[in-house]
Image: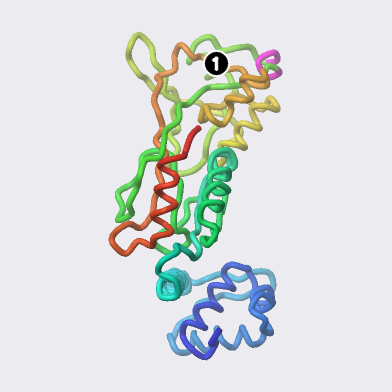
Amino acid sequence: MDVGGRSGEMEVLVRVAQEGSLSAAARTLGMTPSAVSRIIARTERRLGTRLLLRTTRAITFTAEGEAYLRGARRILADLAEVEDAITDQSVPKGRIRVSAALGHGRQAIVPLVAAFSARYPNIVVDLALGDEVVDILGGQADVAVRFGPLPDSPLTARKIGDTGQVVVASPDYLARHGTPQAPEDLLQHNCLRFNFRRAEPNWPFLRDGEVFSLKVCGNIECSSGEALAQLARVGAGIARIGAFTVNDDIGRGDLVQLLETYNPGEREPIHAVFVGGPTMPARVRLFVDFLLEHHRL
């Protein structure tokens, strides 16, 4: 790595963001922490602004630092793509960064990554499982698997499937608190809910052919469907989550499906989201096509 050039400076800053500290970044780069600090200071002097705020406990990026980091990730990814294309134009290769939700990723995406890697051994799949929304345009991922309606954006989306929603609770919880017979009974129960921004605060139900929403409440909120399922299993409350997350639990009797006659039967779409267009790398196109062909719940 040419630390004297701008691409080298970008690589250093990106590595600091990945590792979370100057010393950790220095270890992965084979440099000293003071050398890393000097490179960042040199970059800040050239740009005329602070990129990092450093304390004894943590490193925080300024607004300008976040903007520079997004651009650096994008530029370094473009450079890697150009070099890969020149090195070998006949065999798809390089790194593809994939982001997926934890529960769905473990159940559906991990097996597909294994099969994809066996078919395309020259492509490195960098899989990140988590329930936060990554910035694809900012270079944090090449492909993200997302649930639910998508906001307007310049990104390309391909639908790879959908899933239904079910209301569940553990036998232990129902023994202690009773089994709801109608949606309104949920007002007397502890309902486990999602806490991310796009989560619908009301739960939909169907009665006499009409869909209506019920505002439920509870003392636990979570960003992960897998965590909500686990909370329901241990008797913390009643959850409404993707059927794929709890089908096995229902089959084993660890969870009980509730109010199914009131289920509106709506389906939540699942999309692969990426930067499309004629310049889309071949490895990204191959991975998206593989998801379209093989994704199952």
Quadrant of the image occupied by residue 257: top right
**Image coordinates for residue 1, horizontal then vertical, percent:** 56, 84
Disc count in the image? 1
Quadrant of the image occupied by residue 124: bottom right
Quadrant of the image occupied by residue 254: top right
**Image coordinates for residue 144, horizontal then vertical, percent:** 45, 51
Identified at 39% across, 35% down, the residue is 269
Magenta segment boundaries in residue numbering: 172-176
Q: Nearer the viewer, residue 80 or 173?
A: 80
Q: Which residue, as the protein is rendered here, is positioned at the far front? A: 90
Q: Nearer the viewer, residue 160 or 194?
A: 160
Q: Is residue 173 magenta?
A: yes
Identified at 53% across, 72% down, the residue is 14
Is 137 drawn above or below residue 254 in the view shown?
below
How was this image coloured? rainbow
**Image coordinates for residue 132, horizontal then vertical, percent:** 52, 50
Is 189 drawn above or below residue 283 in the view shown?
above
Where disc 1 sits, the SS reads strand
Q: Nearer the viewer, residue 65 or 89?
A: 89
Question: Which three-letter amino acid code belongs to the residue tagged 1?
Answer: Leu
Q: Main secondary structure of the magenta part?
A: helix
Q: Which residue is mark 1?
A: 258
Q: Residues within 10 Å of mark 1 (few under 14, many from 20)?
A: many
Q: Is residue 28 magenta?
A: no
**Image coordinates for residue 275, horizontal then vertical, percent:** 35, 58
Is 204 drawn above or below residue 288 in the view shown?
above
